[in-house]
Image (spheres, helix red, strand yellow):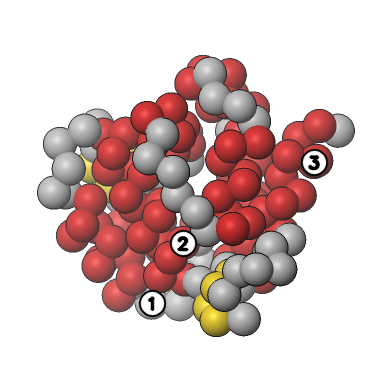
Amino acid sequence: MWRLLVLLPLLLPTASATKQLPELFMTTFTTLLQRHYDDCVHEIGIGPEVPSKIFADLNWPKDPKLKCFFKCIHDHLEFSSNGIFDHDRILLDLKMPDDKLINDCLEKTYKADDFCERAFIMTKCIAVGAAVDV
Protein backbone atom coordinates (compact mmCIF):
# COMPACT_ATOMS: atom_id res chain seq x y z
CA MET A 1 0.00 0.00 0.00
CA TRP A 2 2.77 2.46 0.89
CA ARG A 3 4.28 1.90 -2.57
CA LEU A 4 1.09 3.23 -4.14
CA LEU A 5 1.26 6.30 -1.90
CA VAL A 6 4.88 6.87 -2.86
CA LEU A 7 4.28 6.36 -6.59
CA LEU A 8 1.10 8.45 -6.67
CA PRO A 9 3.01 11.75 -7.00
CA LEU A 10 4.40 10.39 -10.27
CA LEU A 11 0.93 10.73 -11.70
CA LEU A 12 0.01 14.09 -10.18
CA PRO A 13 1.89 17.18 -11.38
CA THR A 14 2.25 20.02 -8.92
CA ALA A 15 0.14 23.13 -9.41
CA SER A 16 3.18 25.37 -9.74
CA ALA A 17 4.85 23.29 -12.47
CA THR A 18 5.18 24.90 -15.88
CA LYS A 19 6.07 21.59 -17.48
CA GLN A 20 4.91 18.08 -16.82
CA LEU A 21 5.41 14.66 -18.26
CA PRO A 22 2.74 13.44 -20.70
CA GLU A 23 0.27 10.93 -19.29
CA LEU A 24 1.37 8.10 -21.60
CA PHE A 25 5.01 8.58 -20.62
CA MET A 26 4.11 8.69 -16.91
CA THR A 27 1.99 5.57 -17.13
CA THR A 28 4.67 3.68 -19.04
CA PHE A 29 7.51 4.84 -16.80
CA THR A 30 5.58 4.23 -13.58
CA THR A 31 4.76 0.70 -14.70
CA LEU A 32 8.42 0.00 -15.48
CA LEU A 33 9.71 1.71 -12.34
CA GLN A 34 7.43 -0.02 -9.88
CA ARG A 35 8.76 -3.47 -10.86
CA HIS A 36 12.08 -2.69 -9.15
CA TYR A 37 11.30 0.39 -7.05
CA ASP A 38 11.31 -1.35 -3.65
CA ASP A 39 14.43 -3.38 -4.43
CA CYS A 40 16.41 -0.33 -5.56
CA VAL A 41 15.19 1.86 -2.67
CA HIS A 42 16.36 -0.84 -0.26
CA GLU A 43 19.61 -1.57 -2.11
CA ILE A 44 20.64 2.09 -2.35
CA GLY A 45 19.25 3.18 1.02
CA ILE A 46 17.32 6.17 -0.29
CA GLY A 47 14.04 7.43 1.14
CA PRO A 48 11.17 5.98 -0.92
CA GLU A 49 9.65 9.43 -1.46
CA VAL A 50 12.78 10.96 -3.01
CA PRO A 51 12.72 9.34 -6.50
CA SER A 52 8.96 9.71 -6.95
CA LYS A 53 8.95 13.39 -6.01
CA ILE A 54 11.25 14.43 -8.83
CA PHE A 55 8.82 13.28 -11.50
CA ALA A 56 6.01 15.27 -9.92
CA ASP A 57 7.89 18.57 -9.84
CA LEU A 58 10.76 17.86 -12.29
CA ASN A 59 13.24 19.10 -9.69
CA TRP A 60 16.45 17.09 -9.97
CA PRO A 61 18.60 17.24 -6.80
CA LYS A 62 22.20 16.15 -7.24
CA ASP A 63 21.94 13.46 -4.59
CA PRO A 64 24.50 10.63 -5.04
CA LYS A 65 21.98 8.08 -3.73
CA LEU A 66 19.37 9.27 -6.23
CA LYS A 67 21.87 8.88 -9.04
CA CYS A 68 22.67 5.32 -7.97
CA PHE A 69 18.96 4.59 -7.55
CA PHE A 70 18.54 5.30 -11.26
CA LYS A 71 21.53 3.12 -12.11
CA CYS A 72 19.89 0.32 -10.14
CA ILE A 73 16.62 0.82 -12.01
CA HIS A 74 18.40 0.95 -15.39
CA ASP A 75 20.33 -2.23 -14.57
CA HIS A 76 17.19 -4.10 -13.49
CA LEU A 77 15.30 -2.95 -16.60
CA GLU A 78 18.32 -3.92 -18.72
CA PHE A 79 18.52 -0.36 -20.04
CA SER A 80 22.25 -0.48 -19.35
CA SER A 81 25.05 -2.85 -18.55
CA ASN A 82 28.42 -1.69 -17.23
CA GLY A 83 27.48 1.90 -18.02
CA ILE A 84 26.61 1.20 -21.67
CA PHE A 85 23.01 1.93 -22.62
CA ASP A 86 20.86 -0.26 -24.84
CA HIS A 87 19.31 2.28 -27.24
CA ASP A 88 16.75 -0.12 -28.72
CA ARG A 89 15.62 -1.46 -25.35
CA ILE A 90 15.03 2.05 -23.99
CA LEU A 91 13.18 3.13 -27.12
CA LEU A 92 10.95 0.06 -27.07
CA ASP A 93 10.23 -0.07 -23.32
CA LEU A 94 9.52 3.66 -22.98
CA LYS A 95 7.35 3.57 -26.11
CA MET A 96 9.13 6.60 -27.53
CA PRO A 97 7.74 7.79 -30.88
CA ASP A 98 11.20 8.23 -32.37
CA ASP A 99 14.81 7.91 -31.31
CA LYS A 100 15.96 11.54 -31.59
CA LEU A 101 15.51 12.22 -27.86
CA ILE A 102 17.18 8.93 -26.92
CA ASN A 103 20.13 9.65 -29.23
CA ASP A 104 20.52 13.19 -27.85
CA CYS A 105 20.45 11.87 -24.29
CA LEU A 106 22.88 9.06 -25.03
CA GLU A 107 25.38 11.57 -26.35
CA LYS A 108 25.19 13.51 -23.07
CA THR A 109 25.60 10.44 -20.85
CA TYR A 110 28.93 9.29 -22.18
CA LYS A 111 30.61 12.49 -21.02
CA ALA A 112 30.34 11.14 -17.45
CA ASP A 113 32.74 8.48 -16.20
CA ASP A 114 30.60 7.37 -13.24
CA PHE A 115 27.84 4.86 -14.06
CA CYS A 116 25.47 6.33 -11.46
CA GLU A 117 25.98 9.76 -13.00
CA ARG A 118 25.30 8.36 -16.47
CA ALA A 119 22.01 6.81 -15.34
CA PHE A 120 20.98 10.08 -13.68
CA ILE A 121 21.84 12.13 -16.78
CA MET A 122 19.96 9.71 -19.02
CA THR A 123 16.83 9.66 -16.85
CA LYS A 124 16.80 13.43 -16.41
CA CYS A 125 17.45 14.08 -20.09
CA ILE A 126 14.60 11.82 -21.21
CA ALA A 127 12.17 13.23 -18.63
CA VAL A 128 13.03 16.87 -19.37
CA GLY A 129 12.95 16.19 -23.12
CA ALA A 130 9.56 14.47 -22.89
CA ALA A 131 8.00 17.15 -20.65
CA VAL A 132 5.37 19.40 -22.17
CA ASP A 133 4.14 22.88 -21.25
CA VAL A 134 1.03 23.07 -19.09
User: Which residue: 44% across, 43% down?
Assistant: 61
Which comes sooner in the sequence, label 1 or label 3? 3
Which residue position holds label 1? 98
Q: Where in the figure is residue 20, as x and y percent of width and height?
A: 58, 70
Residue that sits furthest to the right in the current view = 1
Residue that sits furthest to the bottom in the current view = 133
Q: Amino acid at mark 3?
A: Leu
Q: Amino acid at mark 2?
A: Ala
Which residue position holds label 3? 4
- Mark 2 packing: few (<14 Cα in 10 Å), some, or many (20+)? many
Instruction: Say whether residue 58 is left or right of residue 79.
Output: right
User: Which residue: 32% across, 50% down?
Assistant: 121
User: Which residue: 55% across, 73% down?
Assistant: 19
Report helix, strand or loop for mark 1. Answer: loop
Residue closer to the observer: 41 or 64: 64
Which comes sooner in the sequence, label 1 or label 2? 1
**Separation of marks 1 and 3 at Cα, in angstroms:** 30 Å
Report helix, strand or loop for mark 3. Answer: helix
Instruction: Say whether residue 65 is left or right of residue 25.
Output: left
Q: Which mark is residue 127?
A: 2
Report helix, strand or loop for mark 2. Answer: helix
- Mark 3 packing: few (<14 Cα in 10 Å), some, or many (20+)? few
Q: Is residue 120 positioned above or below 89 on the image?
A: above
Q: Is residue 97 positioned above or below 123 on the image?
A: below
